[in-house]
Amino acid sequence: MESISRRSPLAFLPALWLGLAACSRSRSPHDSALSTPRNACLPADDHSRYYVEAARALGAGSDRGTVAVRAASKLPVLASPSQVQQVTAGAVCAVASSAYDSVYSLKYGVPRKPDRLVYVMQYGSLYLVGDPQVRGGEFFPMVLFSATFAPLGAVDF
């Protein structure tokens, strides 16, 4: 007992600080998705082909209605319809799924769904991401993300 009483009462602080530092490392919602990529993308199917074609028409179309929808959805004009492609790469899909899940659960106050499967389309340098389980009436809403998966807007197909 005598040896304990001679110890400084602050002797435990270095270990405490190391433990706190290890536990409090700042993490973004994408850290786990980037460290353990999983394929969260749905494969190409009839639905994804429809969405790709609709996004191509929206991106490259010049009629008044298309221009109005594109502007309201914050979608840039594309030089060519070929700038819209479905993405199925595991790492991109995992980040896209996590980003979509964050936006969706924040907007609607629903629990996060970490195993969410999504369609991901590269739209020029941006991404359109949508979950086919989420519907807006007869429409399929997709969230528009920057190249770093910051949410920019949304569009219904």
Image: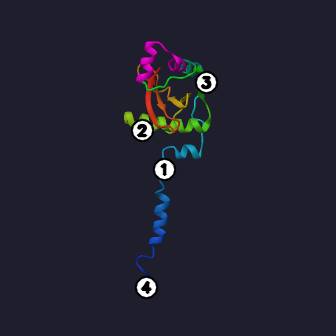
Kindly identify which residue carries mark 4: 6
- Label 1, label 2: how many angstroms apart (C-alpha)? 19 Å
Residue 43's label in the rendered image is: none
Find disc 3 in the rendering and name its residue.
44
Q: Is mark 3 on a helix, strand or loop?
A: loop
How many C-alpha atoms fall within 10 Å of the one at disc 3: few (<14), some, or many (≥20)? Answer: few
| Pointer 2 or 3: first along the chain | 3
Chief SS of the magenta region: helix
Spatial CA span between label 1 and label 3 = 32 Å
Mark 1 or mark 2, which has the lower sequence index? 1
In the rendered view of the protein, which quadrant contains the N terminus?
bottom left
Q: Which of marks 1 and 4 is nearer the N terminus?
A: 4
Q: Which of 109 and 157 is in front in this view?
A: 157
Q: Where is residue 36 in the image (x, y as percent from the top left)?
A: 59, 45
Range covered by the magenta-colored residues = 54-72
x 55%, y 31%: residue = 125
Marks 1/4: CA distance? 40 Å
Q: Distance between the residues labelled 4 and 2?
A: 52 Å
Q: Looking at the image, is mark 3 or mark 4 earlier in the sequence? A: 4
Q: Most extreme residue toward the bottom, as rendered?
A: 2
Residue under numbered circle 2:
111
Give SS at disc 2: loop
